Image: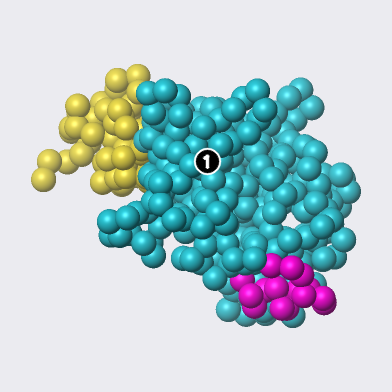
Chain colours: A yellow, B cyan
Amino acid sequence: MTDILTRALAPSDQAIESAVGEETVLLHLENGTYYGLDPVGTRIWALLKDGLGPLAIRDVLVAEYGVAAEVIEADLRKFLTDLHDQSIVTDA
Amino acid sequence: MGPRAVQWSVGRASNPVVDAQYRITDDAGIEVLTQPRSVSGDPEAPSILVRVDVETATLLTHCTSSLPEWEVEHIVLDDFLPKMLAHEGALVLHAAGVLCGGLGLVILGDSGRGKSTLTAFLGQSGLPILSDDCLIVGADAQGHHVAPTYSGMRLLPDSISSIFAQPPVTTDMARWSTKQRVHLTCGFATDPAPVGALVFLDPPATGQAVTLRPMAKAETCIGLVANSFALDPRDTARATVRMRQAAALAQDAPAYALSYPRDYACLPDVAAAILDIMAQVGA
């Protein structure tokens, strides 16, 4: 299985969202799954919507949060895998 | 950093006791294609035609088979009406509510969690009842407010005998439910009320403690959407509006997850905990 960080991903057209303070709520219309994103998850979602790939998102997060790239990668990999498993993001 | 995506898998917003489907007809009528669980598979499954007379604010119903009038009433009032109001753009919650110090306490939770029982108990404690099942949410410059679709109360026989000192007048609600429609002659509030707090009923607690956990805004928003009515939950445009409405309400009103043992003897403690919450929001 290809590492999800090397794949081109995009928000599903079945996912709708709403901002709630610094957090974001996502709903997948087809499968009825809801997600609540914390502020960091919200930032990643915004970058995905801007068309950035996972590795570019990693670089942005390293710069913004000052955390080691390998830590960011591990968290990002888990986060994107969760969203991909629930079809909130799909392969572009 | 740990980006966090908290997942909730919930059923689609609907009233699970009525598996009705709706179709808007070419002549602006609405056909209710009704298939209650007890009669699904029945070749004579009833169909109800509903027409809305805007001039007189009247719902005119015509049933194509021998569905009892009280079942038509249940389907129209408790399933059709909330979904059509939602279709027209309102945020319509599958929720009960009472008035406390002039503020609305909104009680949400899956069917069977005890919304009606708790509401009836609070009503018998002297709080005016907004609804036992459905509230329409509105918003203006002053904030959010809730109003009932209609004044009504439906309870299981066990709740009726445990909560009411004097047996109230009751009638059957539907053949596929043991709930009874309770005919109360007073104790209802019909005017819109500002939202004071939201309380989500958790599954029954195993211990004896009554707990109220403050909920995050995102969790609250999801709970509101999950407990809202929709004619077509997959209608993207309306679902987006519903999400925004729920997010705004979640921002505006404090929300709590309420856990308590489903023991009638605990209801006074539950009521006391809720009144404490309402006192904190100025009720």
Identity, as a three-letter code, of the amino acid under mark 1: Thr
Question: Pointer 1: residues within 10 angstroms few (<14), some, or many (20+)?
Answer: some
Q: Residue at x 29, y 22 (%)?
A: A52
Depth check: B95 or A16 in front? Answer: B95
Q: Quadrant of the N terminus of chain B?
A: top left
- For residue A50, above or below residue B111: above
Depth check: B78 or A21 in front? Answer: B78
Q: Residue at x 67, y 74 (%)?
A: B159
Element under label 1? strand
Expressed as whole percent of the image width and height from the top left, the position of residue B282 reads 87, 45
- In the image, which residues are magenta? B156-170
Residue assigned mark 1: B61
- For residue A1, above or below residue B200: above
Left or right of B14 on screen, residue A3: left
In the displayed orientation, state which residue is furthest to the top: A50
In the displayed orientation, state which residue is furthest to the left: A1
Left or right of B115 on screen, residue B22: left
Expressed as whole percent of the image width and height from the top left, the position of residue B243 reads 51, 33
Q: Is residue A68 visible?
A: no
Residue B161 falls within the magenta-colored stretch: yes
